[in-house]
Image (tube, helix red, strand yellow):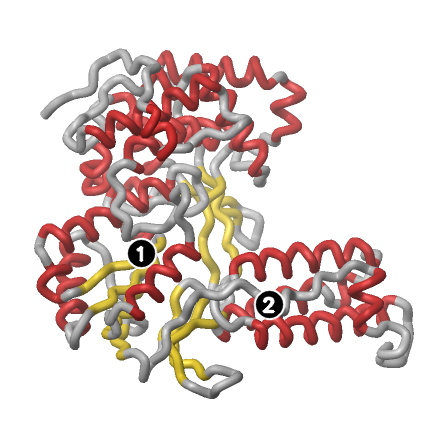
Amino acid sequence: MPVEERSLGSETTPKVMRNWRLGNLRTPKYVQELQTTLHAKAKERSELRFHALYDKIYHRSVLTHAYQCCRRNKGAAGTDGQTFDDIESYGVEQWLGELAQQLREGTYVPKPVRRVHIPKPNGKTRPLGIACLRDRVCQIAAMLVLEPIFEADLPPEQHAYRRNQNAKSAVQEVHSLLTSGYRDIVDADLSGYFDTIPHPELMKSVARRIVDGNVLRLIKQWLAAPVEEKMRDGKVLRTTANRDNQCGIPQGSPISPLLSNLYMRRFIMGWKSLRIEQRLGARIVNYADDLVICCKGSNASHAMAAMRGLMAKLKLTVNEEKTRLCRMPEGEFDFLGYTFKRLYSARTRKPYRGTRPSKKSIKRMIESVRLQTSRNMEWMDAGEMVMRLNQKLGGWTNYFRLGPVTQSYRFIDRYTTTRLRRWLCKKHKQRSKGLKRYPDEYFYNQLGLIQLPKLPQRLPWAKA
């Protein structure tokens, strides 16, 4: 199998430069040229393997840009307690120089990952791994080098963690398939996808392109890093389950999105190589661990069986309780915060296939507004309260702009003004409901509260 030559050079193909825009105005020229060159070579030759990458990871321009990216993303300290202020007091250049030296001399060893639990809307929690800043910077540096290579291999079915693709593009792709006759749906769910990815199989996916032993060793170290969790009694519990069981990647680490995409790629490529897509007319749309299979005819049950078989070979577990079949337009299903179902035109009352924010998404937004305007926030002044609400409302509406969303917007608008009015009355010890003192116009015109758009962007939904 061909192997990439040692010198990457700086020549870039103009066409590739236009299509592959990893860099931005703040990205150093060296990093942009490196990324463009790597992507061009990977795109040109699918069998090419790279063996001269490790020194690029600890190159000063790459490490400096990685630190800037990490600094921009902020984030809490890891198990060593080191913060950005600590690093900047010590001296960023000296700190990066010491990290580069550790990588160059092979003495770098990742520190344990701090685990925290993030509440989910269903009352459960999602474990999140917080690596130390040194390890986060190192992982971002590796991402800057590896992502252009693997991006060339990822199929269009994958929409997560990629340039020019996102959750919206996945939603739009599902809708496009529905309107093209793919109406038999497998609404799939995986049990603990990130926690069950097997390390040996994952490393095979990495080694298909990367033969630089130092880079492979680095990734193995991150996968095997111990995890520390502070218990309620204050004690710290350390576990090496990932290393012992040889499976799982920590959610929250910079390298995890790339690794999760790489492993899901095996499922999609297996689906294609076995000609399941052609035989069953079954198209996949994937975003991280969210998966929908859209089928023509009545082949969803066969597609589900094929999916189970492939997932079992990959040592991944299908959540049988949540995985189900759905026939459109009679049925409905949720995907990435949207509900796909039969809707009716407000003007003509004619049915059409469309999508709107799911009940869970609306409930999650309502709960966010409720917590923001709760009693323990009465210390905040009105201006800051509205600023925080605007951040939440703006983020929500930036995503939920597809389909007929006006009704959802109005509902959230009413709830937000009601909660804000009640919060002001309690803050100022007023017994009245505050309708006269605080009308909606006061919030929108004087305090600057966002009023959700009345004419949102729409997709050209087809009629059923």
Can residue 217 be seen at all in this image of the molecule? no
Secondary element type, mark 2 = loop
Single out the residue that lies furthest toward the front.
348
* Measured Cα–Cα span from mark 2 to mark 1: 29 Å
Q: Is residue 135 left or right of residue 313?
A: right
Q: Judge by depth and name the residue closer to the eye, 156 or 67.
A: 156
Give the residue at x 71% y 55%.
Answer: 388
Say which residue label 2 marks: 455
Q: Is residue 328 left or right of residue 77?
A: left
Q: Amino acid at mark 2?
A: Leu
Give the residue at x 15% y 73%.
Answer: 299
Q: Is residue 26 left or right of residue 445?
A: left
Secondary element type, mark 1 = strand
Which mark is first along the chain, 1 or 2?
A: 1
Determine whether label 2 and label 1 are within 8 Å by CB: no
Number of other residues with Cα within 10 Å of mark 2, as a class: few under 14, some 14 to 19, many 20 or more:
few
Q: Judge by depth and name the residue closer to the eye, 47 or 124.
A: 47
Numbered badge on residue 286? 1
Number of other residues with Cα within 10 Å of mark 1, as a class: few under 14, some 14 to 19, many 20 or more:
many
Disc number lying in front (2 or 1): 2
Q: Quadrant of residue 386?
A: bottom right
Image position, residue 166 (x, y; %): 42, 51
Q: Judge by depth and name the residue closer to the eye, 298 or 56.
A: 298
Q: What is the count of numbered marks?
A: 2
Q: Amino acid at mark 1?
A: Asn
Give the residue at x 48% y 60%.
Answer: 125
Image position, residue 53 (x, y; %): 30, 20
